Amino acid sequence: MKYLVMLGRILFAAIFIMAAPNHFKAAEVGYAAAHNVPFPELLVPVSGVIALLGGLSIATGFKAKWGGWLIVLFLVPVTLMMHNFWAETDPKAMGMQEIMFMKNMAMLGGALLIAHFGAGPMSVDNGRG
């Protein structure tokens, strides 16, 4: 069963690790600017660093509680600014943004659990045992 916890951490962290490089691309900065994110040229790359560090921390189980808090720090503003479905006027766009909002809320729940309980077995934090 200890392998399931490790697998869960890796699967949870994968989306943040894989998405982080996009935060250094002009298209992602432009997308954030279109959503009225302040200082997108600064905040989008910073959010990419936060997502990458949090994801790597959780995946490896190294300082996973801190990694969980980094993901919380990443998800709260991203979810509220980028997936504000209540501001959409097009029903199709509203539905898509609501799905993305709820996906992020689910991940926020997972991040809070990791921030509280830590990495579990098979992690650097617990001596890989």
Image: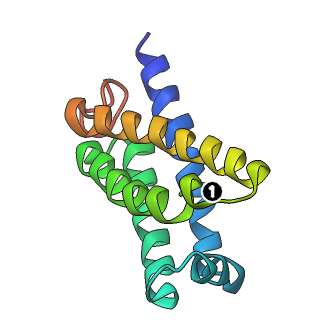
Say whether residue 52 is left or right of residue 96: left
Provide residue 32's location: percent of width, then percent of height: 58, 76
Instruction: Tell me what residue is drawn at x 49 percent, y 18 percent.
Output: 4
Provide residue 57's location: percent of width, then percent of height: 37, 50
| Residue closest to the far right | 92
Figure check: 60 above or below 37: above
Foreground residue, 82 or 45?
A: 82
Foreground residue, 51 or 82?
A: 82
Provide residue 3's location: percent of width, then percent of height: 47, 19
Which residue is labeled 1 in the image?
18
Provide residue 105's location: percent of width, then percent of height: 45, 40
Instruction: Tell me what residue is drawn at x 44 percent, y 71 percent.
Output: 47
Q: Quadrant of the C terminus?
A: top left
Name the amino acid type tagged 1.
Answer: Met
Q: Quadrant of the N terminus?
A: top left
Say whether residue 97 is left or right of residue 101: right
Secondary structure at badge 1 equals: helix
